[in-house]
Amino acid sequence: MLEARNLRKEFGELRATDDVSLQFGTTEGETVFIVGPNGAGKTTLVDLLTGLLTPDRGSVVVHRQADGGIVEEDITDMAPADRVRAGLVRSFQIVHVFEEMTVRENVRIAVLSRYDRTLHMRSVDDGHEDVERTVDELLEQFRLEDIEDEVAETLPHGDRKLLDVAMSFGLAPEYLLLDEPTSGVATREKEYVIETIAEASEADSVTTVTIEHDMDLVREYADRLVVLHEGRVFREGDPDLLETDAELRRVLLGVDE
């Protein structure tokens, strides 16, 4: 389980996160969606969890099984790269892929990084059978096998997003934090992107924490909903709250009832 404990981050007079405490992965492969108005602190929270920002107060803790019990590891001061190796992986709102490489080459780079082979002679070619098997599996999971030889910069935005997330899966995450994976994706492709990610996460028992603005997708795919407002946890619970909680609808959707 990944836990935020009283996380506070201030930028001058702005308190972006105000003593936020949350747990992720309380069940295996949990799908959590974080929603809230602009400026609610959503991306700041993800930055704190993944080590891109250091909290002014509070801690980030991972609970792991060891010797038949659960142990806590405080990762607040752990570097982002070390968090990736520990299973905490981030996908950004802006797609990060190697534009001039093919789809397959992009996924291969991520898998090679998992196996610590990126600096080996000929490491970016197809000379590693175990790596290629993993690449094949990821291409199939993310429905990219038919375009594996296409150059990344030529792909439509939805496929670029899926490639970006497939590369994140190539790092073998236990927790995957996604910052608006449907941002910039055509409406007709949004569900395809989220459904593909959800299926891959379920198959690999990966806990996903997703920032999302499309409430229809949140209703459809969330196991649990976290609503941030003015840097605080405003609501947490079943996505049905989007329909039943009038105050939540006012804050989130601007609906007065």
Image (cartoon, grey):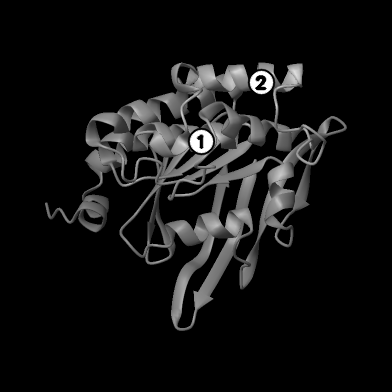
Q: Which residue is mark 2?
A: 134
The residue at the point 60 percent across, 39 percent down is 175
Please give left or right for residue 224 compared with residue 114 in the image: left
Residue 197 seen from this side = yes
Q: Earlier in the sequence, mark 2 or mark 1?
A: 2
Tell me the kind of residue under disc 2.
Thr
The residue at the point 24 percent across, 54 percent down is 247
Q: Is residue 138 above or below residue 162?
A: above
Give the residue at the far bottom of this rendering: 13
Count the numbered circles shown: 2
Residue 239 seen from this side = no
Q: Nearer the viewer, residue 34 or 123?
A: 123
Tell me the kind of residue under disc 1.
Val
Label 1: element kind: helix
Q: Nearer the viewer, residue 211 or 27?
A: 211
Q: Position of residue 126 (x, y in %)?
A: 70, 22
Quarter in which the N terminus is drawn: top right
Q: Nearer the viewer, residue 7 or 167?
A: 167
Rounded to the nearest whole Å, what is the CA distance between mark 2 and mark 1? 15 Å
Q: Which residue is mark 1?
A: 165
Give the residue at the far right of this rendering: 67
Residue 128, quarter of picture: top right
Q: Position of residue 164 (x, y in %)?
A: 50, 38
Residue 70, quarter of picture: top right
The residue at the point 75 percent across, 16 percent down is 129
Disc 1 crowd, CA 10 A, few/some/many (<14, 14-19, 20+): many
Disc 2 crowd, CA 10 A, few/some/many (<14, 14-19, 20+): some
Please give left or right for residue 50 compared with residue 146 in the image: right
Please give left or right for residue 2 compared with residue 211 in the image: right
